[in-house]
Image (tube, grey):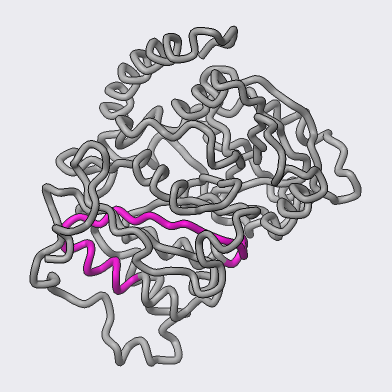
Amino acid sequence: MIYLNLPEDQSGSYKIHREFRIAAENVPGENPKDITLVTHATVNRLHLLLLLAERWKGPMSIVVFAPGNDARMTRFAIDGLRQCSTYIRDYATFHLVYPVTLLPPFDGGNGDLFTEREMEYSNFCTEVIGSRIKALEPHGSYDNDKIPYPNNLLRNIGRDASKTRYVFVIDIDMIPSKGLYHELINFMEQQKLFDSSAKEAYVIPAFEISTKQEIPDSKAALEKAAARPFYYEVCEKCQRPLDYARWWKADSNNGVLAKAYTLNWLDPWEPFYIINSQSPPYDERFKQYGFNRISHACEVHLAGYNYVVLNNAFVIHHGLKTQHSFHSKKNAQNDHNRELFRNFKKELKSKYSNSNRHC
């Protein structure tokens, strides 16, 4: 019955369980002059946090969509991951979201992801937990139109719960360059950005590599790994405005993170970026696949932000995106959200009527 007492989102369609599990070291709100990595997922993708948390080593706000019995499996997965990873236990705060049309069963649900005895096995963290989570078939996913995946709602919940000056919103399968969090903190402090009112979004270039390649730690290793721009085969124009050739040639500043160059947003660019948490929220009408990130990038542009590309940092997807690597309903969802995006841009034109920028 606890689920009935949880607050709802503005639409009344979802129950929100904030701070289901709180980070042991980075308690939200203790240090506002910080950067929180925000991501979201269904339970079957939570195993990706093992590497993500290890690479980031900083505050994380994780929002999990957990319809029906997925909530029970999610609790198992989170507690198991916290046991296996000091980075997850120390830095990650978890929030759960339940659709009101499919709340968790009042009796707690059925089935166990793993037993207490399994959790005591010496090989539990190396061999059991990751494969067990990955094998789950969640109710809420991009392939299930009956329970739409509310990605932008999840992003907003994660942003709002971060309680830090800056947020870095990425997908859970994007892996940051090694040491990025601490490099960003040094960069922010050196530039005095924690006390700045500058309207800047700090872009982290996105790449993808074959699963046959090891995940690179540095820009030099990235080049050796034959990395290509993210979505290169699926939507090359979606990352083209970054100007990857220019980024590769940018001054490394002796390995110290710095501003490389500044860009205005161009349609249909979908960058990943660090931005202050008071920037416009994501539009929660966008669900499922398509236009959910670009809608935010577009509004940020109209709100007066410039996109500042950083010189040595990157995020990478381990695996090449191809036309055949998506769920079966991708195209239909994309078409639906394309129309929504067209109307959204008309709304923005009215909302930012004094802006000379275009979306």
Measuring 10% from the left and 64% from the top, which residue is drawn there? Answer: 105
Q: Is residue 230 above or below residue 237?
A: below
Q: Position of residue 131 (x, y in %)?
A: 37, 70
Q: Position of residue 25 (x, y in %)?
A: 56, 73
Q: Nearer the viewer, residue 192 or 284?
A: 192
Q: Position of residue 335 (x, y in %)?
A: 30, 21
* Residue 2 drawn in magenta: no
Q: Position of residue 124 (x, y in %)?
A: 41, 84
Q: Count every numbered label the image shows and give the total.
A: 0
Measuring 30% from the left and 65% from the top, which residue is drawn there? Answer: 135
* Residue 70 drawn in magenta: yes
Q: Nearer the viewer, residue 216 or 11?
A: 11
The answer to whether 316 appears left or right of 45 in the picture is: right
Q: Is residue 29 above or below residue 24?
A: above
The answer to whether any part of residue 209 appears in the image is no
The answer to whether 3 appears left or right of 166 in the picture is: left
The answer to whether any part of residue 259 appears in the image is yes
The answer to whether 279 appears left or right of 20 in the picture is: right
Image quarter in which the N terminus is found: bottom left
Q: Residue furthest right?
A: 254
Residues shaded magenta:
54-77
Measuring 46% from the left and 61% from the top, which residue is drawn there? Answer: 48
Q: Is residue 256 above or below residue 75?
A: above
Q: Nearer the viewer, residue 27 or 268?
A: 27
The answer to whether 341 appears left or right of 174 in the picture is: left
- Residue 288 image-quadrant placement: top left
Measuring 38% from the left and 30% from the top, which residue is drawn there? Answer: 283
